[in-house]
Structures are given as C-alpha cells and as structure tokens.
C-alpha cells in the first residue's frame, strides 16, 4: 500500500508511452487493446483504495501517504494522500476513463494512436489532481490535464472544434493564473510575509503543504482571506462551471467527441467542486462564511440552478440540453456545499459522484445514436423505442437517475442536499426544489419527443439497437445507479469523517450547538410518579 497512489496515477501514463513508442499507428487493434487493458486494470487498481481505506480513522483522514522532498530549495514535496472524498472521485475517474476508452472503438477512426495516448495521459492528470497534497504538485497536474483535453476537442471534435477548444483552454487558463497568485500569496504569508501589502508572515519554513495551510488558515488576516477566496473562487467557479462563468461549457460539450464529453462532465467539472472542498473551505473558513462572500455564492448557485434548467428546456440539440443540465445540477452541488452542515456537504459530494454517473451515461447514449444518424437534433427523432427497445430502456433508467427518482442514485444526493439546505434556509431549499421540478420537466420531455410518438422519419426505421459492446459500457453505470439508490450507506460512511473535518473548519462550534443531550429518568422513577405528575404530563402532551 505504500506507493499505491503513485501506481494508480501513473499506470495510464505507462500505457500511453507504450502505445506512443512501441506500437505502429496502423495497428488499430493493438492500440485499442493496450489502451483498454491499461484503463481497465487502472480501475481494478483503484478498487484497492475502496477496500483498504480505513473508514474508522479520525479526522483529518488522509491515508496512503507518500512524501519525499522534491525541490527542497523552495519547499516543494512530492506529497500524495487521500481522504474519503478524494477516494470516491478517484474510483469514479478510473471507471469513467475505462468506459470512455471502451466506448471509442467505433467512434474514432482517424489518428487513433494519438487519440488513445491523449486519453490515457488525461486520466493520469485527473487522478494526480485528486491525490496531490502539495500546492505546487497540485498546480502541475491541474495544468497538465488541460493539454490533452484541448487536443481531444480540437482534433476530434465537431465543426466548431477549434473555437470550442480555444475557449475552453483560455477560460481555464485565466482561472489558473488567479489560482497561482493565490497559492503564491499563501506561500509567502506562511514563510516570510508580503511586505508591499504590509502583511507579516508566520516565519515557518517555506512549504506548499496543503495540510499545513489547513492549520494556519484562521491566522490569515480577514482582508487577505477575502481576496484569496475570491481568486480561488473564480478559478474553481470557471471549472464547475457556475453562472456566469459557464459559457465555455456548452461549446466544449457539443464539439467534443463522445468520450471527451463523458470525461468533461463526469470528472473535469468535479475538479472545481473538489477545489472548494479541499482548499477554499478548510484554508479560508472565515471568508467562506462571511456574508460578503457567502450570499453572492449562494445567489449565483441558485441562478445557475434555475437558469441552467430553463435554458436546457428550450434546446433543440440533445447534447446541448444535457450540457446545460450540468450547469443546473452543479449549481445544486454548490448550494449544498455552502450550507455548511454535514448533511448538505455529504449530499453535495455524493451528488458529484451521481452527476458523473448519470450525465456521463447520458452523453454516452447521445453519442451512440449520433454514430448511427449523425445528428443530435431532437426534431429528427420520434418513436425510436419501436426499433431500439434496449437503447430506450437504458436511456430511461439514466434519465430517471438524472431527475432523482427514488431507488436511483440521484434521489439520495438531492434529498441529502435538500435536508442540509433546508436546515440553513427554507428559501434556499425552495429554489433547489424548483430546480428538481424543472429538471424532471426537460428530461422527461426530451425522452417523450425522442422515443415515443409515431415513427414518421424514414431514416429512423432501420436504426440498429445496442450492440453487446455498447451495452457493456452502460451496464456498470446502471449498477452504480441502483447501488447508490438502494444502499448508499457505504458512501456516507466513507464521507463522514472528511465532511465533519470541513464543517469543523468552517463552523468550529457547529457540533456543540447541534448536540442536545437527553437523559431519560430511571424506569422505577417513572413507574412511581405521583398521579398529579402523570396528569400534568398528559396535559403537556395534549398541548
């Protein structure tokens, strides 16, 4: 277990280098086999974390620690470690990466060697982001991850692929620059201070240790916390994406190849929400809880929920509809996170996983029918359940998962968020519930227009139903939907300590305020109570 995180992180990179240097570009079968093998075994390796993670460890529950000095002159360490939140995201990343590779067999016909190399490199970058506990190392993985996705969209995308790829890259890079400035400010404050701002440092040894910043966050002056939080917020909000930083997302989704859309929705967007959980809330708790920042964040989250749902409802393109649904769903995640109580944050983290599973599945399904008809326009379909019944079944289950039907995963996450948000404000909860209603409306309307009604387009009469390979890309997702929907306890157990740790950072007195001690009187005392006491108790009960 000592180096398991490094093994999981760099295993896909080994496969990418093997394909790059030792496989001829004409050997399509060998390229696909090697890419599938490394992506699949990467998922199996990540399951080791699930079974070996100690759920009973106290907070902070960072485990599988790997650490050694990397660039000692500036205090950079190679520092890997995960808690329950990161572990869940890593397992989801490896599963969706395997499915993305396996689903690309017929979708990608040109430059297959470069495509699979970039896909495996992207997986390494994504896993590294979730493992890194050194800010410098985190930033390296964060930036490295952008390059493969840029090329996946720009080379294998749709008609406006270059526009979408450049827009994605510039938006994310702009946020990354602000994040880098915030990291440097933290670094200097921890060691020597920032003289030109008149801020004295703590005099610690130079370090980019994230956990050390967790411990000194409350010592950062309020003014500095405000600007640091704002810089991190813009960087992570672009990645989420929150309204109004979301405009790159529909273009990137629509133009990306199917596997790119799956990875983008399932994993890359979660890096924004993960950034808030790992950095913004534990390191800058006073700023996060201040009215000057909390109210705008909540307001933008609520606008994102309603705006994303309303815009999704009028989309003529299936892929763009699912893309805007992500804006709405991620606004829901942000709202639960900033409720600052265990149920809200647990629901938020679980909904990150649920969104990756259900929206990743929806993009897969849209990609399957696009391969057959080369159009994603809703008006081009209708009644295709008659010729594609298996496809219609998988689409229905995934749709119901996305809208939060009980017994499926979406319901558990949304219910937990609503509980947490209602505990903080019923007004916030009302807007969140409105988003759920609108989400059901646009998803069910999409399903009705595509699958029911008359089969009046001759081009749809010869559509072939799902192949076994296509079914096997969807079956693991359906299993996850049912598992989380019917038995979510293992996921809540894994998240409990890390979430409590975050709540303690943001609201140190939360658990003391929430704890109500009840002492029941002895049994004999209750039996021997005088009659007038019993009558008084009955009267109080009636009141």
Image (cartoon, rainbow, N blue to C red):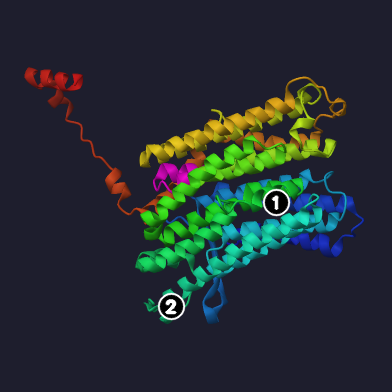
Q: Position of residue 516 (x, y in %)?
A: 25, 40
Residue 439 colored magenta? no
* 199 to the left or right of 438: left
Residue 252 circle label: 1
* 128 to the left or right of 199: right
Taking depth in this image into account, of 2 and 196 the one nearest to the observer is 196
Disc 1 versus disc 2: distance between alpha carbons? 40 Å
The answer to whether residue 59 of the structure is visible from this angle is: no
Residue pictured at 44% horizontal, 66% vertical: 227
Residue pictured at 53% horizontal, 31% vertical: 437
Residue pictured at 54% horizontal, 57% vertical: 236
Residue 343 colored magenta? yes
Taking depth in this image into account, of 368 and 92 the one nearest to the observer is 368
Among numbered discs 1 and 2, the one appearing first in the sequence: 2
Would you name the residue on which mark 2 appears? Answer: 191
* 508 to the left or right of 83: left
Q: Quadrant of residue 316?
A: top right
Q: Secondary structure at mark 2?
A: helix
Q: Quadrant of residue 325?
A: top right
Residue 384 circle label: none
Q: Secondary structure at mark 1?
A: helix
Q: How many marks?
A: 2
Q: Quadrant of residue 66?
A: bottom right
Quadrant assignment for the C terminus: top left
Q: Residues within 10 Å of mark 1 (few under 14, many from 20)?
A: many
Relative to 288, residue 463 above or below: above
Relative to 190, residue 446 above or below: above
Residue pictured at 71% horizontal, 41% vertical: 319
**Which stretch appears magenta?**
335-351
Quadrant assignment for the N terminus: bottom right
Q: Position of residue 321 (x, y in %)?
A: 67, 39
């Amino acid at each position: 277990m000592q180096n398991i995180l490094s093994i999981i992180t760099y295993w896909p990179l080994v496969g990418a280098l093997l394909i790059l240097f030792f496989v001829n570009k004409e050997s399509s079968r060998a390229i696909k086999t090697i890419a599938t093998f490394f992506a699949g075994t990467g998922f199996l390796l990540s399951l080791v974390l699930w079974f070996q993670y100690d759920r009973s460890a106290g907070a902070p529950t960072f485990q599988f620690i790997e650490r050694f000095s990397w660039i000692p002159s500036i205090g950079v360490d190679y520092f890997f470690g995960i808690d329950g939140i990161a572990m869940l995201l890593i397992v989801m990343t490896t599963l969706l990466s395997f499915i993305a590779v396996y689903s690309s067999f017929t979708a990608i016909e040109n430059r297959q060697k470069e495509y699979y190399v970039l896909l495996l490199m992207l997986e390494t970058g994504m896993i590294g982001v979730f493992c890194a506990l050194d800010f410098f190392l985190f930033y390296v993985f964060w930036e490295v991850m952008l390059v493969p996705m840029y090329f996946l969209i720009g080379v294998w995308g749709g008609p406006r692929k270059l526009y979408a790829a450049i827009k994605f890259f510039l938006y994310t890079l702009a946020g990354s620059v602000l994040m880098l400035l915030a990291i440097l400010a933290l670094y200097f404050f921890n060691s020597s201070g920032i003289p030109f701002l008149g801020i004295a440092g703590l005099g610690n040894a130079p370090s980019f240790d994230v956990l050390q910043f967790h411990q000194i966050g409350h010592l950062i002056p309020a003014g500095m916390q405000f600007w640091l939080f704002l810089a991190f917020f813009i960087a992570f909000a672009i990645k989420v994406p929150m309204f109004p930083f979301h405009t790159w997302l529909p273009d990137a989704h629509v133009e990306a190849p199917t596997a790119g859309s799956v990875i983008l929705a399932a994993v890359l967007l979660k890096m924004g929400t993960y950034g808030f959980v790992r950095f913004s809330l534990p390191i800058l708790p006073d700023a996060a809880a201040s009215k000057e920042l909390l109210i705008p964040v909540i307001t933008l989250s609520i606008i994102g929920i309603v705006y994303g749902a309303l815009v999704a409802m009028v989309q003529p393109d299936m892929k763009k509809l699912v893309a805007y649904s992500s804006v709405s769903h991620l606004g829901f995640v942000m709202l639960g996170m900033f409720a600052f109580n265990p149920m809200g944050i647990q629901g938020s983290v679980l909904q990150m996983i649920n969104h990756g599973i259900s929206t990743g599945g929806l993009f897969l399904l849209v990609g399957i029918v696009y391969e057959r008809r080369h159009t994603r326009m809703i008006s081009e379909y209708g009644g295709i359940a008659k010729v594609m019944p298996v496809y219609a079944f998988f689409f229905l289950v995934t749709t119901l998962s996305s809208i939060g039907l009980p017994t499926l995963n979406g319901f558990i996450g949304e219910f937990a968020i609503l509980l947490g948000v209602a505990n903080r404000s019923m007004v916030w909860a009302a807007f969140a519930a409105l988003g759920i209603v609108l989400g059901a409306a646009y998803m069910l309307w999409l399903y009705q227009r595509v699958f029911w009604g008359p089969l009046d387009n001759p081009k749809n009469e010869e559509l072939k139903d799902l192949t076994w390979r296509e079914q096997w890309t969807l079956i693991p997702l359906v299993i996850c939907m049912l598992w989380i929907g019917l038995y979510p306890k293992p996921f809540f157990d894994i998240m409990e300590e890390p979430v409590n740790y975050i709540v303690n950072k943001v609201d140190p007195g939360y658990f003391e305020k929430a704890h109500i001690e009840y002492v029941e009187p002895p049994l004999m005392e209750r039996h021997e109570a005088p009659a007038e006491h019993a009558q008084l108790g009955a009267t109080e009960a009636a009141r």
